[in-house]
């Protein structure tokens, strides 16, 4: 069995890379991932990437923040230390709005950042996972799983026809900076 894990097609132009994706998909070759130095509009739909579930996480974090903020105010102003200030009731809703809103925003922002770092494996001290270092600079890289797609010469020829500058065979999943 071959030790090659991935076939990497390196492109110099995003349009050529999109053409390469089309050629590979026409020939029923599964694409593992695509690495680009800049965002490319419409690539998620072309690769069949499902929509992000980050809005659901944001809603849940916001709900948690709202609950914590409102509970803190209710406990301190109504239950634990009720005060009569200017004849107003202890449970006056307009007084609760600013603090509850700010705590909701704070918990949502911190939760989203935490989930982003966790989901993308960006823990402190962790080496970045990069398949081809040129993808962080000026190249557009298509990664194809070589174990799943066994006809390597066909894949190479399709990538070259689409305008690939280089076709590399990667024996490791990721290259680290160390």
Image (cartoon, grey):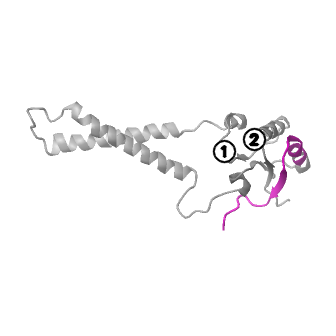
Is residue 132 visible in this depiction of the protein?
Answer: no
The one nearer the camera, 27 or 128, is 128
Quadrant showing the C terminus: bottom right
User: What is the secondary structure assignment of the residue under circle 1?
Assistant: loop
Query: Could you tell me residue 124's position as x and y percent?
Result: 52, 61
The mark found on residue 14 in the picture is 2
Q: Is residue 157 magenta?
A: yes
Q: Is residue 153 above or below residue 133?
A: above
In percent of width and height, residue 79 lies at: 17, 42
Check disc 1 and report the residue beneath it: 38
Q: Which residues are magenta?
A: 156-178
Say few, some or many: other residues with alpha carbon within 10 Å of mark 2 (under 14 / 14 to 19 / 20 or more). Answer: some
How far is mark 2 from mark 1, CA to CA?
10 Å
- Asked whether disc 2 touches disc 1, contact meaning CB atoms under 8 Å apart, the reply is yes
Image coords of residue 118 (percent x, y)? 53, 52
- In this figure, what is the number of numbered marks? 2
Residue drawn at x 68%, y 53% as measured from the top left: 136
Describe residue 107's horizontal placement relative to residue 159 as left or right: left
């Amino acid at each position: 069995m071959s030790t090659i894990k991935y076939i990497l097609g390196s492109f110099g132009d995003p349009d050529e890379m999109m053409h390469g994706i089309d050629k590979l998909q026409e020939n029923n070759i599964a694409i593992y991932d695509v690495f680009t130095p800049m965002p490319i509009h419409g690539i998620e739909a072309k690769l069949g990437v499902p929509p992000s579930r980050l809005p659901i996480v944001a809603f849940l974090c916001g709900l948690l923040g709202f609950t914590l903020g409102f509970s803190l105010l209710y406990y301190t102003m109504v239950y634990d230390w009720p005060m009569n200030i200017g004849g107003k009731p202890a449970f006056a809703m307009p007084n609760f709005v600013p603090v509850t809103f700010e705590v909701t925003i704070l918990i949502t922002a911190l939760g989203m950042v935490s989930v982003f770092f966790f989901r993308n494996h960006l823990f402190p001290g962790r080496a970045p996972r990069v398949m081809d270092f040129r993808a962080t600079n000026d190249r557009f890289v298509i990664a194809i799983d070589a174990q799943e797609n066994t006809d390597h010469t066909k894949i190479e020829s399709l990538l070259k026809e689409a305008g690939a500058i280089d076709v590399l065979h990667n024996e490791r999943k990721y290259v680290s900076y160390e």
